[in-house]
Amino acid sequence: MGVFDGLATGYDRGMLPLELAFLRGLRRRAFPPVGGRVLELGVGTGANLPLYGPGAQVVAAELSGPMLAQATRRRTRATVRPVQADVEALPFPSDHFDAVTGSLLFCSVKHPARGLAEAWRVLAPGGRLVLVEHTRGNGLGGWLTDLFHPLWCAISRECHLNRETVRTVSEVGFRLVRVEEKLLGIFRLIEGEKG
Ligand SMILES: C[S@@+](CC[C@H](N)C(=O)[O-])C[C@H]1O[C@@H](n2cnc3c(N)ncnc32)[C@H](O)[C@@H]1O
């Protein structure tokens, strides 16, 4: 059983303080403009699904069956197809989606570069990658995320506090078009384009 299988029913309640503090605002800036054929990676309990418009056909990919089951209960105006899949080996053709999205995912994926390379592969040329992630912070934020990373990683088992996700997005081939930072860069909205 994976870590998130056991967290599925309490996940939304546990996240509520962060959501109310700033996460919901970041999600609202990131996902409503996304439309067309969308692949959301690591959809979890579906926190972003209500934010897509009626023009979005969303494939909601997620490793954990119990998390995906929660996501199927979300109200949304978009058309949503849930798929149990690993972001490191996506069961979709190349150059297929208009947008790939995700949030709070690449902190816990085992090999983030592999997952991001898969996102690049399945995106159509000119398509957008839109992520909200927690990452290694800047300055004091970097010091704090490095300091607490070993303890947090031991407690959570899967979540890394100090991943350099912006750099990895760029290294797999995306052109960065927007990076917004919150809380000393510990949370970021990251947008990249497949050229
Ligand atoms: C912290 S939760 C975030 C859920 C949701 N995206 C959100 O913003 O609330 C991380 C999610 O990523 C999923 N996940 C982790 N590794 C994955 C992988 N390799 N492939 C697909 N999903 C994965 C977990 O099962 C979990 O649901």
Image (cartoon, rainbow, N blue to C red):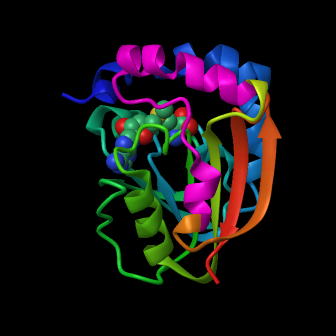
Location of residue 64 with respect to 111 vertically, above or below: above
What is the quadrant of residue 36 in the picture?
bottom right
Is residue 120 found left or right of 178 in the rendered image? left
Q: Is residue 1 left or right of residue 7?
A: left
Residue 38 colored magenta?
Answer: no
Location of the N terminus (image quadrant): top left
Residue 115: x %, y % from top left: 41, 58
Q: Left or right: where does residue 10 sit relative to residue 130?
A: left
Is residue 131 in view? yes
The reply to whether residue 78 is visible in this rendering is: no
Query: Which corner quadrant of the image does residue 110 belong to?
Result: top left
How many circles with numbers are drawn on the protein? 0
Looking at the rendering, the stretch of residues picked out in magenta corresponds to 141-170
User: Is residue 158 found inside the magenta-colored segment of the image?
Assistant: yes
| Rendered residue at 79%/60% (across/down) | 178
Q: Is 161 or 33 nearer to us in this picture?
A: 161
Within the displayed image, which quadrant is ligand 1 positioned in? Answer: top left
Main SS category, magenta section? helix
Name the spot of residue 84 as percent of width and height, x first: 29, 51
Q: Residue 124, position in %: x, y?
A: 54, 82
Q: Which of 144 and 44 is in front in this view?
A: 144
Going by the image, does 17 lie left or right of 107? right
Could you say which is closer to the camera, residue 150 or residue 84? Answer: 150
User: Residue at point 72% right, 42% down?
Assistant: 188
Q: Which residue is drawn at 61% across and 78% down?
A: 194
Taking depth in this image into account, of 64 and 176 the one nearest to the observer is 176
Tell me where residue 195 appears, x and y as whole percent: 64, 84
Residue displayed at 42% across by 37% down: 108
Say if 60 sits above or below 91 in the image: above
